[in-house]
Image (spheres, rainbow, N blue to C red):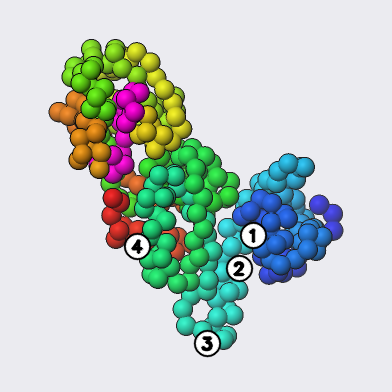
């Protein structure tokens, strides 16, 4: 890009860039840094011209980071953190510079566990402001890869070395059906599956695999039909209504198992387990912050 210089970018311009990269919306980012849209756009142009690269691709419908923008973001965040620390040190302030981050997780885990934890997290980490984003596992990991999220709490499998994870809690699973359904149509042998509908969140059967991939599993079960509902909570609701059987996280159905509304299926077969993990980009300079956050999250069991 013509007109580039070797002068280091200003902190104000980097702060505008970070807001735009985090929100992927220039108007919202301008509000976040208390600038008019015109002044904000000028800041971004100054930064791009000074660096000699294009940082964003913009259309009438979306804003995306370029490869150069993705490369700059971790360094920009580290620079802003260092600048905030300098201000705090000069003022003699005790403690760490403030950090704002957005954590992504799936709906049911976020509502049942993470939202009630927010006050405790704030008390344990007063320098940290946590925002939440709810979504599905694949969507959350995609948003993390493109830096639309700072970290994700998930048990989804990681398929890229770009991401790193810290274990939080083991996640156990159970194969279940409604009591009334299983009384009418038992599922006591593999052949009985032919009379049932298997429910899962999508057609890759990410929940059912904890049964199907168990070394003790009797081979693939052949179900009459499959249904896909997008969310574990939606799968649970349909199972409770007697519309199918499913593998679900034990914490999600513990109460219904205790009351006998749901019954375990083929309980002699141990299902695989997994872990909820705090996942972040390997190139994120805030690893120490994520480790501290993970330690607090581990201290509160998922119920």
Query: Where's residue 95, x and y in %?
Result: 46, 78
- Along the polypeptide, which appears first: circle 1 or circle 2? 1
Of the two numbered discs 1 and 4 in the rendering, the one whose residue sits closer to the viewer: 4
- Per the image, the residue denoted by label 3 is 92
The dot on residue 174 is none
Q: Which residues are magenta?
A: 239-254
- Along the polypeptide, which appears first: circle 1 or circle 4? 1
Which class describes the residues within 10 Å of circle 4: few (<14), some (14-19), or many (20+)? Answer: some
**Is 170 placed above or below 239 here?**
below
**Is 171 placed above or below 48 here?**
above
Which class describes the residues within 10 Å of circle 3: few (<14), some (14-19), or many (20+)? Answer: few
- Per the image, the residue denoted by label 4 is 296
- Along the polypeptide, which appears first: circle 3 or circle 1? 1
Of the two numbered discs 3 and 4 in the rendering, the one whose residue sits closer to the viewer: 4
- Along the polypeptide, which appears first: circle 3 or circle 4? 3
Disc 1 + disc 2, Cβ < 8 Å: yes
- Per the image, the residue denoted by label 2 is 80
Residue at 49% in and 46% down = 134
């Amino acid at each position: 890009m013509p007109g580039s210089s070797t002068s280091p970018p200003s902190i104000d311009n980097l702060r505008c860039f970070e807001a735009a990269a985090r929100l992927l919306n220039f108007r919202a980012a301008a509000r976040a840094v208390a600038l008019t849209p015109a002044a904000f756009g000028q800041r971004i142009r100054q930064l791009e011209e000074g660096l000699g690269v294009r940082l964003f691709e913009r259309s009438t419908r979306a804003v995306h980071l370029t490869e150069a923008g993705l490369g700059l973001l971790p360094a920009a965040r580290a620079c802003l953190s260092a600048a905030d620390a300098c201000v705090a040190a000069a003022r003699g302030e005790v403690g760490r510079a403030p950090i704002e981050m957005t954590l992504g997780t799936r709906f049911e885990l976020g509502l049942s566990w993470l939202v009630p934890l927010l006050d405790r997290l704030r008390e344990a980490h007063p320098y940290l402001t946590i925002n939440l984003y709810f979504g599905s596992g694949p969507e959350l990991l995609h948003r993390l890869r493109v830096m639309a999220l700072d970290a994700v709490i998930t048990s989804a499998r990681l398929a890229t070395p770009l991401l790193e994870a810290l274990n939080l809690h083991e996640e156990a699973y159970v194969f279940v059906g409604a009591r009334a359904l299983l009384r009418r149509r038992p599922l006591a042998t593999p052949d009985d599956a032919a009379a049932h509908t298997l429910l899962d969140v999508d057609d890759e059967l990410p929940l059912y695999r904890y049964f199907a991939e168990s070394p003790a599993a009797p081979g693939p079960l052949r179900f009459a039909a499959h249904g896909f509902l997008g969310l574990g909570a939606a799968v649970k609701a349909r199972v409770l209504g007697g519309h199918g059987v499913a593998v679900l996280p034990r914490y999600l159905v513990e109460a219904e198992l205790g009351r006998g509304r749901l019954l375990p299926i083929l309980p002699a077969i141990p299902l695989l387990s997994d872990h909820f993990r705090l996942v972040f980009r390997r190139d994120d300079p805030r690893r120490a912050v994520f480790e501290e956050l993970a330690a607090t999250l581990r201290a509160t069991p998922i119920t």
